[in-house]
Image: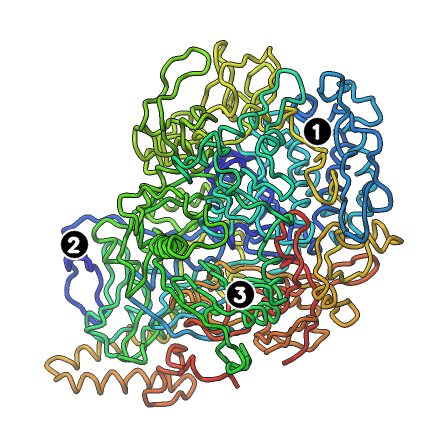
Amino acid sequence: MMATQDVIARSATTTERPSIREIGEVAKLIDTSKCIGCKACQVACSEWNDLRDEVGTSAGTYDNPIDLTAQSWTVMKFAEYENPGSGNLEWLIRKDGCMHCADPGCLKACPSPGAIVKYANGIVDFNQDHCIGCGYCITGCPFDIPRISEKDKKAYKCTLCSDRVSVGLEPACVKTCPTGAIVFGSKADMKEHAAGRIADLKERGFDQAGLYDPDGVGGTHVMYVLHHADQPSLYSALPDEPTISPLVSLWKGVTKPLALLGMGAAVLAGFFHYTRVGPVRVEEEQENAELSEPVVHQVDPSVHVVDPKEPRP
Amino acid sequence: MTNHWSDIQNADLVLIMGGNAAEAHPCGFKWVTEAKARNKARLVVVDPRFTRSASVADLYAPIRTGTDIAFLGGLINYLLENDKIQHEYVVNYTDVAFIVKEGFGFEDGLFNGYDADKRSYPDKTAWGYELDEDGFARVDKSLSHPRCVYNLLKQHYSRYTPEVVSNICGTPQDRMLQVWEAIAETSAPGKAMTVMYALGWTQHSTGSQMIRTGAMVQLLLGNIGMPGGGMNALRGHSNIQGLTDLGLLSNLLPGYLTLPLEAEQDYAAYIAKRTAKPLRPGQLSYWQHYEKFHVSLMKAWYGKNATAENNWGYDWLPKLDIPGYDVLKVFDMMYQGQVNGYFCQGFNPIASFPNKAKVSAALAKLKYLVIMDPLATETSEFWRNAGEYNDVDTAAIQTTVFRLPTSCFAEENGSLVNSGRWLQWHWKAAEPPGQAQTDVVIMGGLFHRLRELYRKEGGAYAEPLLNIDWAYRQPEEPTAEEIAQEYNGKALGDVFDLQSGAQLAKAGEQLSGFGLLRADGSTSCGCWIFSGSWTQAGNQMARRDNADPYGMGQTLGWAWSWPANRRILYNRASADPAGNPWNPEKKRLVWWDGGKWGGTDVPDFKVDSPPADGMNPFIMNPEGVARLFAIDKMNEGPFPEHYEPFETPIGRNPMHPDNPQAISNPAARVFKNDMELFGTAKEFPYAATTYRLTEHFHFWTKHCRLNAITQPEQFVEIGEVLANELGIKAGERVKVSSNRGYIKAVAVVTKRIKPLTVDGQTVHHIGIPLHWGFAGVARNGYLTNTLTPFVGDANTQTPEFKSFLVNVEKA
């Protein structure tokens, strides 16, 4: 964890942020053109963070686990693409995980004070001790990243190894990556490194090679080098133009300040009640979603009950 | 590897063929990305499947499994036809000018001297050079002699036209020519291509010849001995290079010395046959020193008991009555009921060996089976009924199984030899769990008990055991350090320079290298190529200085590389005949400085031999040059020829459609009961190939939760076109059968496997990863080797895991 002086944004909080420290922004750069999909990053992530997911099943793809879960904070996504221009087959492999947005939708959506924070270096972190398991961070995230644990009903995602970074180490996935496809440093340095990689890719025939650092979320602290920066969605549905859901803006712009005002001296139980009922109403307007807890669970693949010992149907 | 991992960064072009480095060697693969970054190197991948390596390649070409000789033979023809060879290199450093004996011939798919009943070439005398009166090989530097290697080579491969090759391999011609053109560019002096291959070449009935064809291409391009060049075998296990170096094959002794055959009862004749005299004037022919290595080995094993009088214990060495007791042979013997007991050390044969049913039946005929392994392997539980995955009648199996848990590499000190021949020392990181013991303790304990029994009770010919020298500080547990020092060798008496008489080592000292080994019993050395790894200066394998003063990535202070800390073999060939690097800017390795050879690597050469003396770079060969013509060294002939896999999807060899003897490798050994189990394309229409995945290591890591999470369940890969034809969707279960059994697995339906047009037919590939079984924490699965055929390469007997036939249906 970083020091509290480094927190520059905090969910459901209106107090002035600390600002006396000058801290540079960091970034992790994932070069899809150097990635061989070996999943060493997945394993390193699980090891460093002491996570052990279930032994799942094969869904007929190389993706395993098939999606992010509360215990798998990064997974490799494999997409087969027949390039109509070159006629070549391409196997586009992307490491999925939190993008650490400069303008984090999860933080905006979160109703629990301090459950989601943004540090001055750009890392967006979840504090599970403040998490109430409402799942709004999932709604707020344009990349569909946070997952709620079946075990403790709290939200989890990649921390960009904020514990390692705070003591001058690179994230575990970066440390382990055998091909140097994942690199870490200041955001400025990473952009410069990316520029070199993009020039190399263009020289190798990928005219549309470029950097993925989308404006819609204010830029990200996890960036991709893509061979086809003009078509991010080729990479297992990486959003072409990610933005924060209008629902979150609504919640943030109107409902949340009211909620916070109303909170005042409210007891914790009251707060719980409010946050659970309030925003669900917002969703209700849209798609008549269920009112009770399963709303959260349905968007969360991690809560699908998987028993590896169970024989397959 | 002739070169080594970090040298790949010097390549201008990387060819991955017969391997999938990104998948199976992800850490080493980083050097490919370095080559791309440093030299703008292009990566070319040729493989039946579009692999993880292909996913980061600049150019990919599909190929039918088992047809690499045709592809590379076509490339040889292309290089010769288009004059894309490194002329000065080829003429000076290879055998192109050598004149082959009259009588050598090749007709309708067979070389001269074939005996169909024996399935071999018993008489290879014509496969050699014409010699002059002095015993030297005749050469014609003008290359005009019709029987010089150059003309024979040209003639042999002229048949491999692009049309013919494309028809065999299924590689579209335009794509094939693109690959050939890219490769041909590296014929420019000073440009280098590296070839990275692995089990995708070795595991064929023609595997050795596939590798040879690759090496011939590299010779024609002048890429052997070059930084960023070479023939680079990516070894399949972390210390498998060490296994071969130490001679753990039934016909070898440590350091690639060879066991005598039964007919070789005479010591002097045994030595004379292996002491190769130079075949050209002025050549080094380093195997001239064979006896020094051999005697030093016998002194290491037998100490004072090995004397000049008893021919250094020659009679105690086993004499082979057949070419070798390779594992295929041993398991066939076991299957025939000729083996009582078996020690299985770090080996899981029921999973790792072809035709599981045969291996399982063979194990059931044993009286006892001893397993030494850190894991509870399938072999140790071959008797256990694991439902559909191992449906055996336990009560009918009477084999007694002893399971002795051993430590793993991280739980002991020692060295590992990597693919690049580096001996790297490692230190114990943890105590072994439970009752696990090191393999040394177990083997040492067994030795002492056996020796005691022989001492007490006597027995047939106990001398080889009773005479062993066992001078370890704790006889029950020799340390890794003691054994490593023994491999390096020490002076038993004072050692003097043979010319000047100067003292080189005092009695008792560790030797500085194999140059000090003597045939008079004054030195001992457990493995001559490792001599220099633990000298008087200490453990050279433990060095960790990665200084790279020339920026050539040779890091001579990091660990220790055999032989003599040379990082690139044949590196004299990186310089022109006058002794100057072909590429002085980017590829300088060793050069002649006017008085001696030196440079960024340790010269693999006689350091004081001036270029004018004409000594050639291939110092282990009596002719001093590299062989495009393999003389009598290969069992199926001096030039590689395309033969079909034993289970061929097209049923004939398009090169020799009318000769049934030349469909598949005519010199491969096939046991009768296995011949009957080969399937045909009529019943099993699809070409299958087996392989590993990045997420797992062999059958080990399915015992590890994190690996099991990343690939939890057995699957097979089926191309989209075939899957559509068969109505199979991704995620559905399929049954894959060969003539030896079946497995069931999840279908991965992919665009990465495309149908190929071969010999007028459509050939589909089925990809079958091998990692699952009925022990471990991953989901249980079938042993993939239920499917594979029990036949090996004609030279190495490595099983043909990469090419066989299957049928696929919905499960």
- Tell me the amino acid under the disc marked 1: Ile
Residue B66 picture location, percent across and down: 70, 54
- Tell me the amino acid under the disc marked 2: Ser
| Left or right of A16, for residue A145 | right
Whether labels 2 and 3 share one chain: no
Per the image, label 2 sits on a secondary structure element best described as: loop
How crowded is the residue under tag 3: few (<14 C-alpha within 10 Å), some, or many (20+)? few
Establish if B6 lies above or below B409. above
Residue B63 picture location, percent across and down: 70, 53
Establish if B289 lies above or below B237. above
Chain ID of residue with mark 1: B
Residue that carries the numbered disc 2 in the rendered image: A19
Residue located 32% across and 38% down the image? B542
Per the rendering, the mark at residue B85 is 1
Chain ID of residue with mark 3: B
Between label 1 and label 2, give the one nearer the viewer.
Answer: 1
How crowded is the residue under tag 1: few (<14 C-alpha within 10 Å), some, or many (20+)? many
Between label 1 and label 3, give the one nearer the viewer.
Answer: 3
Which circle's residue, 1 or 3, is located before the other in the chain? 1
Whole-number angstrom distance, CA of label 1 to CA of label 2: 67 Å
- In the foreground, B467 or B68: B467
Residue A37 picture location, percent across and down: 48, 58
Spot the residue most to the right.
Answer: B658
Q: Are marks 2 and 3 in contact (CB under 8 Å)?
A: no
Per the image, label 1 sits on a secondary structure element best described as: loop
Q: Quadrant of residue A265?
A: bottom left
Per the rendering, the mark at residue B340 is 3
Q: How many marks?
A: 3
| Left or right of B490, for residue B629 | right
